[in-house]
Image: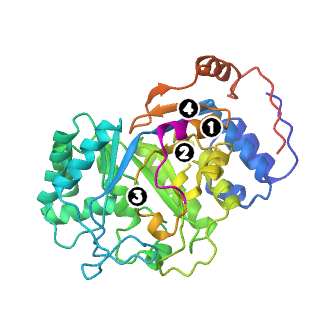
């Protein structure tokens, strides 16, 4: 591989990345501070092509929020309500099962279910909900609960985290969600989510779930009061746990939405900031196969651009997203399957419908087989005889 590089700190980092060597935290921070966005995107795209060629995945999923009543008062959250609030809500297990039955008719393969830390629902509500969903939608993948919800359920059930997870799995839980990670640095966490679980507790819930032989995703909420070093520290802790367990299927960076909350941030993450975050994540998280461009937070057009900056997944059809929209997101509430496919094809990539675990279900496009063959013969990888020029 013949790579032309300009002299400077980035060139040294780029040489490591092109040699398929791991970068450290100081180098990740240098990438974040790099002003050459195109060069950074090129490097991230090379890393992504090694893992995923030109394929971009999406999932047919349906969001369900069972309740927005919550005992916490996180400064960044526009979703949570107290029992005294008129716009609080709580769904019955029957109502949730009806939504699941409708989802089956729509071809949905995954139900993504989270809520607040409800002040009075018993543990049986959650196990009954999982049982009802499995009865209403046999074969549907149930991706439910954040780490803080799991800790709340362990407290309700008066059990250890592992015993709580075992009981939830027996009731039908297939995967836990990555939400609630926010930023791991304690100083930042205390400012935006006082009273929430610590970084150690978040990671330990996922560690235990992985040690049970199960998989999960993880997230990072960026663009509020944290700095770039805080973001890199967050990525470091995720990479270390992935080294330990290998249980994360994908990483989902979440752009902070500034409306209807108490964090004093007037300017949300810019497009440049989001592209840098996607790119640095792809380069630094070398033990993650998949990076998601979350179109709900980015908007569809920016999510398409993110596919040139290391992302290989656009998340899903979603339907009725509440958490980001209550915080001011102006993206659509849902995307149809055809709209997801079109959004990917417009970037000259191969759409792939996936399942909860990022495993491919359907490869789309009349020319997708030829495209995939071409991709695999020309992809940049160590030892590839094809010469590539990257101007960085």
175 vs 23, nearest the viewer: 175
Tag 2's secondary structure? loop
Q: CA distance from mark 1 to mark 4?
A: 15 Å
Q: What residue is at 19 percent from the left and 48 percent from the top?
A: 130
Tell me the crowding category of disc 1: few under 14, some 14 to 19, or many 20 or more residues within 10 angstroms, Cα based.
Answer: many
Tag 3's secondary structure? loop
Q: CA distance from mark 4 to mark 3?
A: 25 Å
- Which of discs 1 and 4 lies nearer the camera? The answer is 4
- Which of discs 4 and 3 lies nearer the camera? The answer is 4
Cβ atoms at labels 1 and 2 below 8 Å apart? yes
Q: CA distance from mark 3 to mark 2?
A: 15 Å
307 vs 328, nearest the viewer: 328
211 vs 106, nearest the viewer: 106
Q: Earlier in the sequence, mark 1 or mark 4?
A: 1
Cβ atoms at labels 1 and 4 below 8 Å apart? no
**Residue 101 disc label:** none
**Residue 48 disc label:** 1
Q: Earlier in the sequence, mark 3 or mark 2?
A: 3
Q: Earlier in the sequence, mark 1 or mark 2?
A: 1
Q: Earlier in the sequence, mark 1 or mark 3?
A: 1
Residue denoted by label 2: 291
Residue 346 percent location from the top left of the image: 66, 37
Residue denoted by label 4: 351
User: Does the stretch in magenta take in 305?
Assistant: no
Tell me the crowding category of disc 4: few under 14, some 14 to 19, or many 20 or more residues within 10 angstroms, Cα based.
Answer: many
**Residue 179 disc label:** 3
Q: CA distance from mark 1 to mark 2?
A: 9 Å
Q: What residue is at 43 percent from the left and 31 percent from the top?
A: 359
Residue 145 visible in rendering:
yes
């Amino acid at each position: 591989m013949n790579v032309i590089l300009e002299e400077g700190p980035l060139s040294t980092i780029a040489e490591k990345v092109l040699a398929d060597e791991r970068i450290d935290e100081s180098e990740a921070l240098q990438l974040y501070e790099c002003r050459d966005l195109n060069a950074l995107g090129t490097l991230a795209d090379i890393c992504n092509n090694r893992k995923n060629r030109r394929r971009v995945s999406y999932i047919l999923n349906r969001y369900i929020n069972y309740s927005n009543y919550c005992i916490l008062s996180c400064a960044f959250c526009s979703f949570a309500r107290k029992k005294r609030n008129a716009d609080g809500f709580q769904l019955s297990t029957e109502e949730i099962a009806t939504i699941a039955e409708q989802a089956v008719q729509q071809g949905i393969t995954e139900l993504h279910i989270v809520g607040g830390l409800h002040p009075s629902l018993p543990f049986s509500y959650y196990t009954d909900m999982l049982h009802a969903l499995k009865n209403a939608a046999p074969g549907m993948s149930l991706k439910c609960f954040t780490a803080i919800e799991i800790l709340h359920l362990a407290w309700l059930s008066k059990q250890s985290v592992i015993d709580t997870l075992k009981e939830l799995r027996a009731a039908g839980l297939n995967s836990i969600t990555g939400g609630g990670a926010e930023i791991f640095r304690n100083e930042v966490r205390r400012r935006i989510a006082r009273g929430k679980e610590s970084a150690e507790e978040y990671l330990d819930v996922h560690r235990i779930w992985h040690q049970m032989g199960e998989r999960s995703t993880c997230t990072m909420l960026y663009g509020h009061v944290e700095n770039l070093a805080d973001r890199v520290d967050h990525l470091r802790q995720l990479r270390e746990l992935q080294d330990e367990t290998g249980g994360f299927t994908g990483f989902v960076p979440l752009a902070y939405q500034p409306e209807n909350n108490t964090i004093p941030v007037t300017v949300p993450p810019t497009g440049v900031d989001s592209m840098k975050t996607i790119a640095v994540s792809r380069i630094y998280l070398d033990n993650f196969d998949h990076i998601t461009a979350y179109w709900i937070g980015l908007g569809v057009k920016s999510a398409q651009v993110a596919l040139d900056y290391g992302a290989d997944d656009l998340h899903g059809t979603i339907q009725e997203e509440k958490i980001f929209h209550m915080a001011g997101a102006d993206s659509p509430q849902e995307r149809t399957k055809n709209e997801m496919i079109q959004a990917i094809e417009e970037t000259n990539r191969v759409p792939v419908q996936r399942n909860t675990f990022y495993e491919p279900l359907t490869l789309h496009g009349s020319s997708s087989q030829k495209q995939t063959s071409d991709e695999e013969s020309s992809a940049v990888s160590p030892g590839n005889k094809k010469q590539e020029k990257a101007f960085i």
